[in-house]
Structure formats: C-alpha cells, structure tokens
Image (cartoon, grey):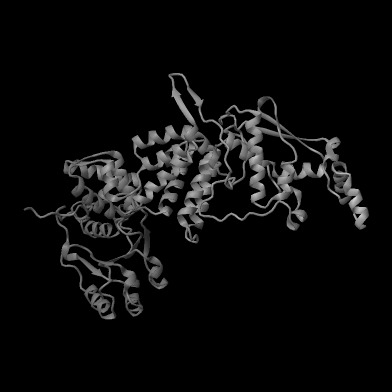
Amino acid sequence: MEHFIVSARKYRPQNFKDVVGQQAITNTLENAIKNNHLAQALLFTGPRGVGKTSCARILAKNINQQDTTFSEDEDFAFNIFELDAASNNSVDDIRSLTDQVRIPPQTGKYKVYIIDEVHMLSQAAFNAFLKTLEEPPAHAIFILATTEKHKIIPTILSRCQIFDFKRIGVLDAKNYLKVICDKENITAEDDALHVIAQKADGAMRDALSIFDRVVSFSGSNLTRKAVTENLNVLDYETYFNMTDLLLENKIPQVLNAFNDVLAKGFEGHHFINGLASHFRDLLVAKDKVTLELLEVGDATKKNYLEQATKASIPFLMQAIQKANACDLNYRASKNQRLLVELTIMQVASITFDGEKKKSANYIIPATFFQALSPALKTVATPIQKKIIIETPPTIEIPKPKLEKPILNSVVRRTSSLSLKSIHQKKTTIKTDIEVNYDNHPKTIFTEKTLQELWKAYVTTLNEKGERSMASIVGSDLPKLGKNFKISFTVPNKLMEDQFRKGRTKLLNFLREKLNNFGIEILVTLNETVEKKFAYTPLEKYKKMKEINPLVEKLIQTFELDL
C-alpha cells in the first residue's frame, strides 16, 4: 500500500509562482533578491495557512541560487535553519542560535534562520535576541514568522522589514483547487470547489485539508450536494428556497422551512447570518458594476441574477436591517428560536398589500391563512386560477382573537373604559388597521345570519365582562345593505364614540365567522330614537310609568325619592 501524503504537503509551493493569493509580497521579494536590496531581518505576519513559512523557505533557497555556479536543483539545506519558537522559547535556545550565527556558510553566500511562531518567545529571549537582530553578520538573514504580530515587543518590530500576508480570496483558492483536481484526475463541480474555498475562510492549508476529507467521502467525483452534506453547511439552495417563500408571503411554509434547518442541527444564529449574507448578495447582483463582488460559481451566479429580478431594493434593504437586528439581539435573547421566527415572519410581511403603509414590525394576520387553507379550492387553468368558495357561514361563540400571530406570549385583556384610557391621548389609540382585502374571500350571507351572529357577539361581550360595550352593540340590530355594507344606528354621540372604539374587534369577528372580508360597518347617529333608552333615574321612572301607571301610586304611598 502506497503511503498517502496529504495535499497540504504534496502541493506545498516550491517557488514564488506557486504561492496563491500573495502576488504583491512575492513580487517584492523577487525584486529585492534580484536587485540585492533584501533586509537582513524580515517579519512575515498574517493568518494561518496563507504561505508565510512556505515563502520563507522559498526565499531562503532563492537567496543562494543567485550565484550562477550552482545548479537549480541545489536546495542549500545546510544553509537553512528552522527554529520552532513555540517549543524553543527560552534564553538558552536563543543564545545557542546566536552562537551558530557567527559561523559563515561552507557553501553558498548566506545562512538563513527561519524562526516560526516567534511571538511565543519569552521576554528574556526577546531581549537576548535584540543585539544579534540589530547587527547580524553579513552572511546571516533572519526570517521571523508569526500569526500574532501584536505580541511581539516593539523593539523587535522596529528592527524588521514587515510583510503582512492577507487572507486568500475564495476565487484564488477555488482556482488552485481546480489545478489540483486536474493533477489528481478528479472531476469536481465548480460550486463544490467554491463551497470548500468558502469553508476554508482564507486559509489555503485548511482548503487542502477539507479537499482531502471530501475526496475520501465522495471519491473522484465531487458534487455540490456531497460536499455540503459532508461539511454540514447550509447550501445556497436553502436560502434560495427560503427567499422565494418570503417574497410570496407564505409564513406557514417559511416557519416549516426554518424548522427543517434546525432539525439538521444548525443554530438559528448561523441561519440568520447566512440569510442576511444572501440578501446582501442579491443586492449586489442588482447592478452589473457590483456583480464582481459576488464570489460564487457561474451556475449559482445565474440563480442570484434570476432571483434578484424578483426582489425589490426596498424589500432587500428592510430584510437586511431586520436580519442584522436579529443577529445583534440573538445572544441576549432568552427565547432565541422565537426571535428568529418573528424576524422571518416580519420579512415575509414586507411585500404584503403592496404599497400600503404598515408598521415596522407588521406581521400578516393569522386569519388570512386560516381563511385560505380550508375554505378555498383552486381550479388551475392554462390562463389563470379560479377561486371557488364553498364554506357556509356558521354561528359559534368566538374565542379571544389576536390581531397578529404572537408565539409564546401572554395577552393581557383590559376593559375599554378605564381611568388610564380616559387620560390617554386619542392619537395613541389605533383601532382600525388599513389592510387590502381585495384578494380575500367574500362569501354571500343573509341579514338573518348577520343578526344571529350580532347577538352571539353581544353574549360574548357579557361573558368577558365588557357590559358597557355589550349594551351599546345590543341596543339595536344591524341592517345589511349593498356590497356587504352593514348599517348600525346609535341614539347619541357618546354611544357612537364608544362603538367606534370597539368596531374593529366586531368587524374581525364578523369577517371570520361569515368568511367575508369585504364587510364594512357604517355607524350613524339618530337622536330621534334617544328617548327609547332610559339613562337617568327620572327617565327610568317615566319609562316604568308608561308601562305600568300603578308605579306612581306606589311611590306616593311609600313616599319614595327619585
């Protein structure tokens, strides 16, 4: 059995041309060697796996190859000394190094000392190294490599020429993986390599390690599905499907899709961050100028361009703001799943009712989906869809109904008449919410059915303790007009004002029970009927006297006060 060599070692760069994503640094080093303008102390700093140690070895080899008397195959291994400062960080280790520096090379022109993870040196070791680093022999060159430049003392930094290595771009890493696939006779989808490069997060060594792992799982054929399954990452397809549901205002399907994501073991925080990034990519795909910022494969880029035409810029801007707000509040939230669910429900409600103004946290009422699911049957034709409504009206005592779907919350019911409500400004009371019900069902009903439901609502108000509102609603029966307009008459201004405050709940009750969202209630004031109602003790006495004249004799006999 042949010994397996990991790709990170097998394809380690052997010259500056093989180094991925660090062209500015490699060009600088090549020109410095060519023009004999190389400093005697260099510091390579940057994230892990971006080529710091590889560049140091290539530089050490190329320094001595400038002499034409040597062949290109000579690696000058005897002139290159590597020290791992993570395990050799004491003063004695540095003193031993400085003693070796004094000896000139036997072959070649320079001796190169590569100190990896130099930030791990102790304070005493740094101080022992200062003098040698500042005035090294002419034949010695020091190359220091570290991932944490801030831990190196300033006196060391001031003596070095610093090269900052950057993270390797997704496209650069993907292109290098393509080269390796060609050498290894592996067929790979473009999107599959892109997922690997994205998962590596700018480290080429990590990308090669992930590549080996996926090849062991999938064999010589890498597909996007196999890669996402093996790496357990959320695929682009998840966010494309979720965005389609959000644009179509399908809140029940959105919640089910999010539940599927959680069932796969992903955190809500990871999902909402990915959704915000997806909205950002859709925004980038809106303009050809910014299309270059979209670091995805060609097939995925087409999907972004297609979905970007469906999503408007105002929708994307609001969706990004809501997703970012959820991201900021996620760690502090005690019910994190509820926070994400409310966020995606709000995003799904952005495009509902078109141009109508809605509150910032508006969510489509649950009655909209309840009315559509059991009551409608759709008959598809090649041209359009016809909606047939077959749900007859029924009379039921209603349950308390929320204006918006709220998960895991407690509803506190208060009376419409209270000291707090009297002192509260009228501008803060909003009972009527403007909603476009053009596409909602409008079942035909009779005036008799309407009046029976009206009486049932009065009974419900009495059971809930809202007797004042119950007496106002029960003071008369409604009349049904054209286009489902209901007229209701009240005898005085006070009753009219109180009825208008509770009209929204009554209207929602009738719309739900009659399955007709085109209903409107028109309240009119008719003061001529005011005398039919007795409010003061004198009015009550006169009313009783009309019904039974003996009441007057009773009051006179017992000398009662009114």
Q: Position of residue 199 (x, y in %)?
A: 33, 51
Q: Is residue 505 visible?
A: no
Asked if residue 23 lies left or right of residue 476, the reply is left
Quadrant where the C terminus sits is bottom right
Q: Is residue 57 above or below residue 228?
A: below
Q: Is residue 274 left or right of residue 54?
A: right
Marks counted in the figure total 0
Q: Nearer the viewer, residue 230 or 194?
A: 230
Residue 549 location (% of width, % of height) = 89, 44
Residue 170 % position (x, y): 34, 46
Q: Residue at x 15, y 67 (%)?
A: 106
Please, is residue 79 above or below residue 217 in the view? below
Closer to the camera in the image, 248 or 481:
481
Q: Residue at x 91, y 49 (%)?
A: 552
Could you say where residue 247 lies in the image, as x and y percent from the top left? 49, 37
Q: Nearer the viewer, residue 376 or 214?
A: 376
- Give 175 or 188, whichever is nearer the viewer: 188
Toward the left, the furthest residue is 1
Query: Residue drawn 42% across and 71% down?
Result: 154
Name the residue at 36% across, 37% down: 300
Q: Taking 281 as reference, is 408 above or below it?
A: below
Is residue 401 among the parts visible in the rendering?
yes
